Amino acid sequence: MSLPFASSPRSSVGIEWELQLVDADSGDLRQAAPSVLDGVAGPDGRPHPHVHPELLLNTVEVVSGVNRTVGGAGADLAGAIEDLRPVTEALRIELASAGTHPFARPAYQRVTDKERYATLIDRTRWWGRQMLLYGVHVHVGVEDRAKVLPLIGALLTRFAHLQSLAASSPFWGGEDTGYASNRAMMFQQLPTAGVPYQFSRWGDLEAYVEDMTRTGVIDTFSELRWDIRPSPALGTIEVRVCDAATNLQEVLAVSALTHCLVEHYSARLDAGETLPTVPPWFVAENKWRSARYGMDAILILDDAGEEELVTDTVTRMLDELAPVAERLGCVAELGDVRRILDDGASYQRQLRVAERSGLDGVVASMVAEMRAGHPL
């Protein structure tokens, strides 16, 4: 099976952010996406270009266009949220986000009426109905297909660091799970989700997709829901490992780090270097450690098994990536990663709020951070 990879400007960037529709009175989720989407549609009924439906009716997704900078993508997201506000406020709905909702029950959520979603739920049954999850996806343009698989291999040496920084799902169905990112553990239960395979040749990926299609596992490439995957139709690498952030500042901080990592490794390929990789068993272990311990995770750095506290590694990464951020125009956004290192990740804030004010307080804090646009 041929898998063409579209032409894309090098290190262009786009961001997708899944938002929760929260009842302004109860704090629970509202199954109101059709009304919200209709409300932001154009006068001719055309869908809003930056607001999309998602799997569940309690969710809308705001998406940027193709941008040169993370700041430009952020402006698209902010504009979409501004367009949503009059519609949601009229319905007494608040916008919020995190990797999960702290107390909503999966059994009560309704699925969007689309064939692809119905097929997913029919195949995955109970696990599919547990996908009460929210993420941020970052697309980075790659100008040469030959770079894609080496770049993904290198990103897998640092993807768990991104997951720790973005971890925002400590609660599930009203319980403290003990995980920084319970979303990470839940989402990988889908049969084509989780850590990607590490293919050495594009032809191996094409053979895999052909096998999966022929045997009925997938119908389209988009049904491979890996933490990092090529997006052949867009000509990008899509990093999907991050929990949804509660605020735009943290969305852009983690997106800037992702953007810089891809460009950093791309430049190393241009210089004739062989990019770093780690064995699949270390990748899987890092994913689990990151999900469990978040900012306190000690992660495996390389194929020799060297280990380091995630915050120490990220501190060094920020210094190393500073010239890349200058080139990409995201110095301020990358700098906000230091705020996460200093002040803690979203899951840590949520746990502190829950201790003081319970899970209703956590929802209120999520709503407040969405409105403020930064951590509180």
Image (cartoon, rainbow, N blue to C red):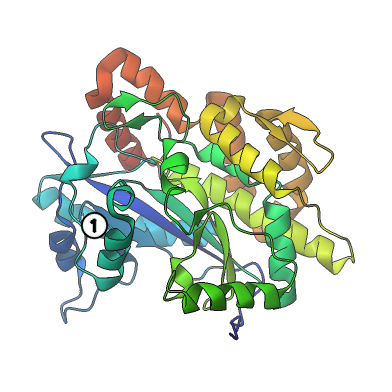
Query: Which type of secondary structure does the marked residue at label 1 adopt?
Result: helix
Residue 336 versus residue 149 in the image, above or below: above
Q: Position of residue 250 (x, y in %)?
A: 48, 42
Q: Which residue is identified by label 1? A: 84
Q: Amino acid at mark 1?
A: Leu
Q: Residue furthest front?
A: 215
Residue 145 versus residue 27 in the image, above or below: below
Q: Position of residue 256 (x, y in %)?
A: 59, 51
Of the pair 87 and 242, the residue shown nearer to us = 242
Residue at 16% in and 82% down: 44
Q: Residue furthest top?
A: 356
Q: Position of residue 271 (x, y in %)?
A: 88, 65
Of the pair 375 and 47, the residue shown nearer to us = 47
Whether residue 212 sits left or right of residue 41 in the image: it is right
Q: Position of residue 318 (x, y in %)?
A: 71, 41
Of the pair 60 and 177, the residue shown nearer to us = 177
The quarter of the picture where the C terminus appears is: top left
Residue 274 versus residue 354 in the image, above or below: below
The quarter of the picture where the N terminus appears is: bottom right
Residue at 52% in and 29% down: 292
Residue 321 seen from this side: yes
Q: Residues within 10 Å of mark 1 (few under 14, many from 20)?
A: many
Residue at 28% in and 57% down: 60
Q: How many marks?
A: 1
Q: Residue furthest right?
A: 272
Residue at 32% in and 19% down: 354
Whether residue 371 sits left or right of residue 149 in the image: it is left
Residue 330 seen from this side: no
